[in-house]
């Protein structure tokens, strides 16, 4: 009898403590990881990056305003998305072979004026199982960010071209410079992103910025070693890594891929291509841009 009373006396506080902890967990689902590198792409030419200065940016081009909801934090699932902007270029065929040999696929946000020069490479991306998203036909900030009509004309031209050349209609995109770029203010006193982000979404596109940058904001081409260490260090602590590379001009990006894939794999990452649902938008707590 005594031991029964003792068990009851011990069990009641344990139940209360357990219930209390459970309530705290349920009420706080937003434990998050930061998503936030933001560098801007130069307005004059694709492939060249200039660091932008959003209000909340740090000197290293990162900001902490964007977080990812983290159901996956608890699941332990880690996914890396290799994304390449501004191509295709003369380096892309070697890049595609490298991706193949690493047994991974990537997402390419292409530039129309480049794609026109390498239409076969565009087709190769699709036949390899890689994904093509809309970036910009001209990649010229002074034109595309001057007004909404210019932006849409440029966007639609590339959208149509990708469909025509590959037979696949793109459904993802990346704004030149990212959605947090402030360079567009130079060409339009209004915040044009407030207009064009919802327009593009209404057209059925999902846009993606990035939360890991391979270092292209450097004026000089980064070395292969620097690219690897930069990417790997930024991926630490992340479950979702959307990694920005440039598919143009610099051999070091191609050379860095095998080791990056190997290092991230050993960190537990798997690799995937971006799609409208992957990573799920529901997991993006604060998207890269807040059209408030
Ligand atoms: Zn770009």
Image: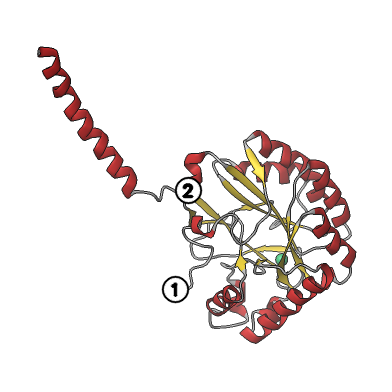
In the picture, measured across the screen, residue 155 lies left or right of residue 100, that is left
Residue drawn at (76%, 77%), measured in percent from left and top? 160
In the picture, the disc for residue 186 is: none
Q: Quadrant of residue 24?
A: top left
Q: In the rendered image, is residue 86 in sight? A: yes
Please give the residue where the numbered disc 1 appears in the rendered image.
292
Q: Helix, strand, or loop for circle 1?
A: loop
In the picture, the disc for residue 70 is: 2
In the picture, measured across the screen, residue 211 lies left or right of residue 169, that is left
* Image quadrant, ligand 1: bottom right
Image quarter of the C terminus: bottom left
In the picture, measured across the screen, residue 17 lies left or right of residue 98, that is left
Sequence-earlier tag: 2 or 1: 2
Residue drawn at (83%, 63%), measured in percent from left and top? 122
Above or below for 121 versus 136: above
Residue drawn at (17%, 19%), measured in percent from left and top? 7
- The residues tagged by marks 2 and 1 sit, at their Cα atoms, a distance apart of 23 Å
* Total numbered labels: 2
In this view, the residue in front, 219 or 133, is 133
Above or below for 224 versus 275: above
Q: Quadrant of residue 256?
A: top right
């Amino acid at each position: 009898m005594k031991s029964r009373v003792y068990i009851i006396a011990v069990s009641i506080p344990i139940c209360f403590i357990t219930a209390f902890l459970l309530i705290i967990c349920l009420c706080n689902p937003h434990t998050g990881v930061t998503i936030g590198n933001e560098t801007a792409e130069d307005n004059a030419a694709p492939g060249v990056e200039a660091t932008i200065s959003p209000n909340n940016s740090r000197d290293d081009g990162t900001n902490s305003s964007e977080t990812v909801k983290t159901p996956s934090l608890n699941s332990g699932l880690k996914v890396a998305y290799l994304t390449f902007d501004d191509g295709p270029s003369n380096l892309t065929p070697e890049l595609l072979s490298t991706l193949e040999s690493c047994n991974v696929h990537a997402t390419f946000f292409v530039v129309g004026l480049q794609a026109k020069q390498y239409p076969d490479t565009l087709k190769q991306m699709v036949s390899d199982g890689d994904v093509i998203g809309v970036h910009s036909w001209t990649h010229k900030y002074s034109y595309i960010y001057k007004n909404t009509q210019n932006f849409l004309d440029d966007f639609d031209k590339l959208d149509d071209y990708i469909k025509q050349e590959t037979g696949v209609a793109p459904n993802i995109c990346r704004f030149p410079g990212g959605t947090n770029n402030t360079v567009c203010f130079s060409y339009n006193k209004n915040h044009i992103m407030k207009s064009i982000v919802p327009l593009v979404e209404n057209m059925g596109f999902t846009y993606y910025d990035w939360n890991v940058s391979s270092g292209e904001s450097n004026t000089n081409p980064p070395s292969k070693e620097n690219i690897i260490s930069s990417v790997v260090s930024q991926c630490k602590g992340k479950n979702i890594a959307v990694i920005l590379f440039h598919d143009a001009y610099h051999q070091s990006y191609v050379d860095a891929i095998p080791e990056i894939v190997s290092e991230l794999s050993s960190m537990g990452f798997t690799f995937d291509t971006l799609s409208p649902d992957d990573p799920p938008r529901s997991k993006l707590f604060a998207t890269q841009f807040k059209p408030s």
